[in-house]
Image (cartoon, rainbow, N blue to C red):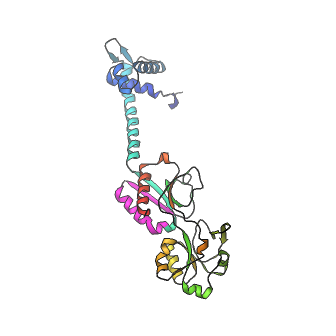
Amino acid sequence: MWTIADLDLPAVSAFAKVAEERSFRAAAKALGVSKSTVSQRVVRLEERLGVRLFDRTTRNVRLTDAGESYYEAVSPALAALRAADELIGDMKEKPTGRLRLTAPMDLGHCVMGDVVGRFSERHPDVEVRVDLTDRVVNLVEEGFDLAVRSGPLEDSFLTARRLSSPQSKRLFASPDYLAEIGTPARPEDLSGHKILAMTGHREGATWRFEAADGPLSIAVRPYLAINSFPALLELAVAGRGVARLPELRAVGAVASGRLVEVLADFAPPPSALYAVTASARRQSASVRAMIEVLAERLMR
């Protein structure tokens, strides 16, 4: 029984080119191979089919009746294959199709609306789907083309491009709150404070610090939890507790005296945002275009 594995595409292509050029020499030139290679491929095809496809003389080449019928049958299929190759080539050069992107909730609330708006204006043929989550998704298994993540990569099979300058998340509280409850001197002192935390953050209820003798992890129990850094900032300014916020988000409130940084000597090292993909070699034009827009928006 014949299967697709039996198809000798180089032989079929050589036959079709000879049929079109009416010359083995011209077909060889068009295909970029030797005349003997074209002849061998056509002979191989004739042997497999069990028929003669060309009548050959020293001066010309003419299709037999079987050759005419075979050419009429295979030429549309070869044209379809060429069209498929051209389509993929266009997709590699022009952003089209669907793009699935995942990003942290706080980033999504801050900038992803602007990013997607810019991207869609430039590339209207791309259907963008954004999933905001602080969970570390599996790009391949869950069907995502691109993820925005912070910190070092744990998976060596992923590739990343830095999108932003390194930033720190630090602890802040209002002067009134600290005057009433007291200022923590060490991370362990947070057990006696009201903690304002991000809901569903991938670090869970554990905050990491840098002590003189190395990294330190402290389990905290949130007093209030919400999935918005702007809301956490407002709660901290209102004196509701101690919040862990991106440094740049709190700079205005600190400058105006509405917030004070606490445990500054224990702040973790800054980390940057990265665009993460499963393989740099397989990046589509849509993925490359989205990474450019992200970098344009975040690298400030």
Vertical arrangement, residue 121 with respect to residue 225, above or below: above
Q: Nearer the viewer, residue 254 or 27?
A: 254
Q: Position of residue 279 (x, y in %)?
A: 52, 48
Asked whether residue 122 is drawn in magenta, I would say yes
Q: Quadrant of the N terminus?
A: top right
Q: Position of residue 41 (x, y in %)?
A: 44, 21
Q: Residue furthest top?
A: 58
The image quadrant of residue 224 is: bottom right
Vertical arrangement, residue 113 with respect to residue 37, above or below: below
Q: Nearer the viewer, residue 93 or 154?
A: 154
Q: Position of residue 65 (x, y in %)?
A: 36, 19
The residue range painted magenta reads 107-135
Q: Quadrant of the C terminus?
A: bottom left
Is residue 203 found left or right of 45 in the rendered image? Answer: right
Is residue 212 found left or right of 255 in the rendered image? Answer: right
Q: Position of residue 129 (x, y in %)?
A: 45, 59
Residue at 47%, 59% in the rendered image: 163
Q: Nearer the viewer, residue 142 or 211?
A: 211
The image quadrant of residue 177 is: bottom right
Q: Count the marks: how many?
A: 0
Vertical arrangement, residue 26 with respect to residue 288, above or below: above
Asked whether residue 156 is drawn in magenta, I would say no
Vertical arrangement, residue 210 with respect to residue 293, above or below: below
